Image (cartoon, helix red, strand yellow):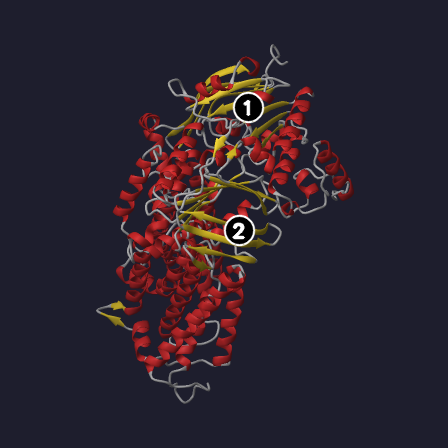
Amino acid sequence: MTTGESVTVAADRKRPHRLAAMLRSQMRNIAPFLTLICLFGFFAAASPSFATLDNLGNILTQISVTGIIAVGLTFVILCAEIDLSIAAIANVTGIAVAYFTLQESYVNIANVPMPGWAAILLALALCALLGLVNAFGLTVIGIPSFIMTLAMMQIAAGISALLVRGQIAYKVPPLVSTLGSSSIGGVPWIVIVAALMLLGGHLVLTYTRFGRYIYMVGGNREAAEYSGLNVKLILGSVMVISAVCSGIGGMLGVAHFGSAQQNEFDTYLLDSIAAVVVGGTSLFGGRGGIGNTIVGLFVLGVLNNGLDHVNIDSFLKILIRGLILLAALVINVYAQRLRERTAD
Amino acid sequence: MPTGLKPILELQEITKAFGGVEALRGVDFALSPGEIHGLVGENGAGKSTLMKIIAGVHADFSGRFILDGKETRFRSVRDAHAAGIAMVHQELSVAPDLSVAENVFLGNQPTNRFGFVQWRRMAREAGEQLKRFGIDVDPMSRLGDLPIGLQQLIEIARVLFSGARIIILDEPTSALSPPEVERLFATLKRLRDESTSIVFISHFIEDILRVSDVVTVFRNGRKVAETKAAETSKPALIEAMIGKGREALEETYTHDIMLPPPAEKPVVLNASGLSLARSLRDVSFDVRAGEVLGIYGFMGCGQLELARILFGKLRPDQGTLAIAGGQKTFRSTADARRAGIAFVPESRRDMLFHQEPVYKNISISVLDRISSLLLKPSRERKIATRQVDQLRIRPAAVELDLGMLSGGNQQKVALAKWLSYPPRLLVLCEPTRGMDVGAKDDVIHIVRDLRAKGLAVIVLSTEPETVLSLADRVLVLKRGAVVREFSNERISKDRLLEAA
């Protein structure tokens, strides 16, 4: 049996090892941050137009929609689940809010105009409902989230298609339009919304009971159940939260892009997953958080934006993004293994 | 007898640390060909760690590792396998969805020259091997459909007949019935006579003495004694294990114990007519406040399922539960917890968060009592510190990750998390399994304290000693049905085993 005394003795002798062990266990937080600094340094050196205040503003705006969607996804991944329907739900929510808004006469969509507040509420209800269906499939029926949300991806895309029928809508309610495409004091509203949602997500995960439950369910689902937590309720909630975050991102995104059409958000699925995982949140659940997601968002944002500044073949860009994502996944899995070894 | 032979395996000055905690300090260990080497020691003494080094699980240690006279170093379990070393770990590691034959041949199925698996040959050979071991099953049946004890035997058989020349068994008998243990020992002795070397770890000192040639004792990461089994005794080994100055704490329970008459206390839980598929048949009982009900039976008798029904993890096909008179249907474990039921499952892995600090492990099940929306970390720490003190959990550091604690202390944490707000009914599965003598005693005292405070306790175990040391009343489960109740009468280990 290990006595308290023997531990202190060992600790005194092994102080440098302790530090190394701490560094190793923090690997998942340190590595993404170093990646970010390296990328930033590289682009700043390679292009004079990169490290400017204006461009920083660009980057912030560019990562906002991804950031809003990634808040909910962080919750899901912390529970060791996945949500592949985020981009499709964002898309259908954006389209829905436009569908319930009066469009110009040349837009050939049989839409149902309503007051702005009603359109927003209906769109939110739609994404929450789709999230509930995800939650139901995952927790009550027992379909793995990977498959369930893959089906939901198709369902949401199908609703999108039925609503716009290949057309493009432009108008959204004034509130959505303001938050999505205008600024206050030089700061775009969409950046403020993204920042507030990320902050909110962080507070929930760190300081609330619900947040603690999410980490525990992700850390060891069986143990959470044997501790008397309602695991299904928690998993269901994160699926709904993810869908609602996606919906908000979708509405603001539509306003930001100035149009609502099919397949508008397709790239956001990979981007959001990449942001969460590149930031160092464990795909096995229980480790990471919004702080990691923010770093991941910046890594992707700096990468996307920086590649435009160095005038690189735009087809090569896609490959480079893929490689960076792969590198981050390798680090993610490796960090998990190091951690398990220290905790053995 | 092996004495005088050159050792097949020799370890010198082995030191291994996890985080800052040293699990082994300068340990020497030698294994001769054709010997059964017993290892004893309290939890966290370093036995399993040393064996995992030999089996290639831990590659990162200091010291010399000499196999067949040559210094070597395994980088993985694969290396160890290639060198003819195989280990049966404490936890069951089988593939439940594969057939018995596939499990027996896992990793080296017989193939023809085109690389296709020879199913018929595999089934036949697996069947023959198992029969030699006294196991008569259809080699093509799905392993997961067999009782747990049988699965464990098959896993042991796989390793025994893998052709390895060094075999390590970590607590192989904990889930076996007495006749199964006999068969295992007979096989071990036969393999020894065929000059296989066997390391045998167990908490059952009688078993160690019966089967081993040599016994090594570990304490606190050091080797403290090595002696021939014929020249030592149980008290001597216990003294070496726990150090001098402590009485032999372990009771043998070979004598009779008088169970007390039933108390006139209110019934806390009433189970009536519980049935579940193939596991349970019409199980009914009461538990009263201030009473410890022991439920004994061999592995696979339906205890695990019964315990899970009580905690809302499984729903019975038939039958009802009533808590303090009111009938209840649990839709989740959360319902059961709210009804005042606490549960400790038999496996540590399933009940704790190894990557989280101790205090979060303890506070998890009372968070909704001590905090509403926001967490109160300082209160969590205070509650955890109190529990760590009361249960004498070592090291007494609530910020330490749980994974850094030894097995016995982890088990105490699993109990601690239910005690900050005592429940009405505590359901304990195998509360002392794999624990050393001192920690067992601690647990027994904790349970007696709780009983004195008026808690109802159900203890389910496959170890007669555990039930006898704790229970006021004992039910014996056999193939899913209650076959005997001991109450207000004399009971002993013999009678208990007889009833099962």
* Residue at disc 2, secondary structure: strand
B4 displayed left or right of A33 = right
The residue pinned by badge 2 equals: B284
Whether residue B321 is visible to the viewer of this picture, yes or no, is yes
Give amino acid for label 2.
Ser
Image coordinates for residue A164, horizontal then vertical, percent: 47, 80
* Residue at disc 1, secondary structure: helix
Nearer mark to the viewer, of 2 and 1: 2
Residue at image point 51% right, 27% down: B255
The residue pinned by badge 1 equals: B206
User: Image height check: is B457 above or below B317?
Assistant: above
Q: Nearer the viewer, residue A39 or B226?
A: B226
Work out which residue is located at the far top of the displayed protein and give it: B4
> What chain does mark 2 sit on?
B
Give the quadrant of residue B74. Answer: top right
Image coordinates for residue A206, horizontal then vertical, percent: 31, 53
Residue at image point 69% right, 23% down: B190
Whether residue A214 is visible to the viewer of this picture, yes or no, is no
Check disc 1: other Cα within 10 Å, few if <14, some if 14-19, many if 20+. Answer: few
User: Image height check: is A106 above or below B284?
Assistant: below
Q: Nearer the viewer, residue B116 or B264?
A: B264
Q: Nearer the viewer, residue A13 or B274?
A: B274
Task: Indicate which disc, 2 or 1, sits on the residue closer to the N terminus.
Answer: 1
A121 displayed left or right of B124 = left
User: Image height check: is B312 above or below B256?
Assistant: below
Give amino acid for label 1.
Glu
